[in-house]
Image: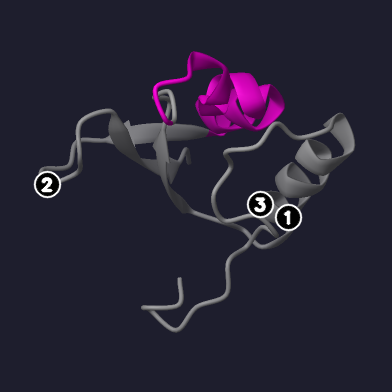
Amino acid sequence: YGVMGRVSPVYEMYLVAPASEAVERRDIRDLEEKNVQWAVVSGLKVFDHEELSLPRTHPRVWEYLSAKFEAVPTEGLPPGYELLHRRS
């Protein structure tokens, strides 16, 4: 976001450390209130630890993104990453 001169819509830009339910609900609320239309996400494990993958550290956010967004085929992203766009 800094490179693009934009402010992150959620407090944590890198969702690596496990989050409490309250933090996840705040993040989802922020995504809704700020009408986020695009996201780049990875469900991969971090530092070779499966328990640090987004579906494990932020299961509610992962579920929200899976339900409200759809993957957009994109060339050039690292393996395991997806560009998501909010469903109409």
Front-lying residue, 45 or 88? 45
Q: Main secondary structure of the magenta part?
A: helix
Compared to residue 67, the image places residue 83 above or below, namely: below
Looking at the image, is mark 3 or mark 2 earlier in the sequence?
3
Compared to residue 54, the image places residue 35 above or below, namely: below
Q: Is residue 63 magenta?
A: yes
Looking at the image, is mark 1 or mark 2 earlier in the sequence?
1
Cα separation, mark 1 vs mark 3, equals 4 Å
Cα separation, mark 3 vs mark 2, equals 25 Å
Residue underneath mark 1: 30
Residue 68 position by quadrant: top right
Q: Is residue 53 magenta?
A: yes
Compared to residue 21, the image places residue 33 above or below, namely: below
Looking at the rendered structure, the secondary structure element under dot 1 is helix
Residue 51: percent from left, percent from top: 57, 17
Residue underneath mark 2: 76
Residue at 37% from the left image edge and 78% from the top image edge? 3
Q: Are marks 1 and 3 in contact (CB under 8 Å)?
A: yes
Q: Which residues are magenta?
A: 47-68
Looking at the rendered structure, the secondary structure element under dot 2 is loop
Cα separation, mark 1 vs mark 2, equals 28 Å
